[in-house]
Image: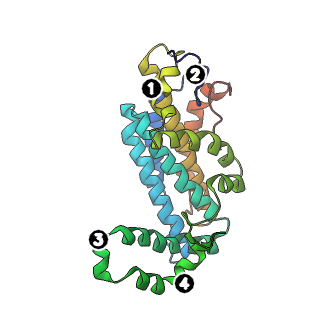
Amino acid sequence: MSEKPTLVVGMPSRLWNLPFESILEHHLKFSDAIVDTPGITSDDLPNFIANQSFVYAYNSYKALGRLLPELYHEAAATVLRQLWEVSLNLHWMMLDPDDRAEAFVNFTVVEARKLFKISDEFGSLGSLDDFDKSTHRFQSRFRKRSRQGKDQIQTNFTSESIRNRSEELGEPWGREYDFVYHLTSMHAHGAPGAVLHAVFLNHYGNVQARERDQTALIGTLAIQMMKRNVDLLADVGIIPDKSAVDDAYSAFQACITPQTEDKSRVPPPGK
C-alpha cells in the first residue's frame, strides 16, 4: 500500500523558510522583556485569575524555550496548545470578568470531586454525599438534568465550546481554532495525523530543514500569543507599562516580515 493517494491535514504545499535561529533569539528576548515588565497584584477576583493565568501561560512559553532549540516540535506542539487554551480562557473570561471569574474558581470544586470519587483516601474525609452537600452552592451552576432525567456535571467551567469561545473573541482566535488548536490537539493526543505528518512533507530536501521550519512556526505563534496576553493585561491596568514588550515584539516582526509577505507560504499569522 502506498501513502501517495492519502490526503493528510495540515500539509503545506511550499517551504516556509522561516529564520529559525533568529526566531529562537527573539523568543528569548521577548521572554526577558516580559520578566522586566512590572505588574500589579490585586485581591479583585478577575484580576487575580488574570494574573494567575498569565503566569501559567508564561511558564508554558518558557517551557517552549527549552524544547525549540532541540527541534522537539512534536512536544512543543502540545505545549503550544496548552499556551493557546489558557490564553483563550483568559481573554474570554475578561469579556465578562465578574461572572466568568467566579465560574472559573468554582469549577475547581467539580474537579476536586472527580478526584475524590476515584481516590481510596477520600473515605477518611467523609462521604461523597457530605462533600456534595457542603459544596452545593459552588457545584449548582455546573449541574443539570439530561432529557432522561439523569444528573449531569459540566466538563468545563463554561458550557460554551472552545469553538464558540474563539468565535466570540473574534480574530485571530477563530482562525487559530481552525489551524493552531486543531493541529496541536492531534499532537496532544498522538493522533495518526500527527504521527504520520512528516511522511507527507516530501517537498523538503532534508529532515532538518523540515523540522527547523515546523519548530520555528511554533516559536512564532507562541510569541504572538504572549503579546496578546500582555496587551490584555495592559488594557485592564494590571501591566502599567508594556513598552519593553512592545519594543521586543517590533524587533521580532521586523525579523519575520520578509518571510511572511507572501501569505501563501505560511499559515496566517496572528495579531
Residue drawn at x 54%, y 22% is 17
Q: Nearer the viewer, mark 2 or mark 4?
A: 2
- Residues at discs 3 and 2 in contact (Cβ within 8 Å): no
Q: Is residue 260 above or below residue 112?
A: above
Residue drawn at x 65%, y 48% is 173
Q: Secondary structure at mark 4?
A: helix
Q: Is residue 202 above or below residue 75?
A: above
Q: Secondary structure at mark 2?
A: loop
Q: Secondary structure at mark 3?
A: helix
Mark 3 or mark 2: whose residue is earlier in sequence: 2
The amino acid sitting under disc 3 is: Asp
Horizontal and vertical percent for residue 240?
Answer: 57, 63
Residue 199 or 19: which is nearer the viewer?
Answer: 199
| Residue with the mark numbered 1 | 211
Q: CA distance from mark 2 to mark 4?
A: 52 Å
Q: Nearer the viewer, mark 4 or mark 3?
A: 3
| Residue with the mark numbered 4 | 137
Residue 224 or 184: which is nearer the viewer?
Answer: 184
| Residue with the mark numbered 2 | 6
Q: Residues within 10 Å of mark 2 (few under 14, many from 20)?
A: few
Mark 1 or mark 4: whose residue is earlier in sequence: 4
Horizontal and vertical percent for residue 191?
Answer: 48, 37
Mark 2 or mark 4: whose residue is earlier in sequence: 2
Q: Nearer the viewer, mark 1 or mark 4?
A: 4
| Residue with the mark numbered 3 | 120
Q: For residue 46, which quarter of the picture?
A: bottom right
Mark 4 or mark 3: whose residue is earlier in sequence: 3
Horizontal and vertical percent for residue 3?
Answer: 52, 18
Mark 1 or mark 2: whose residue is earlier in sequence: 2
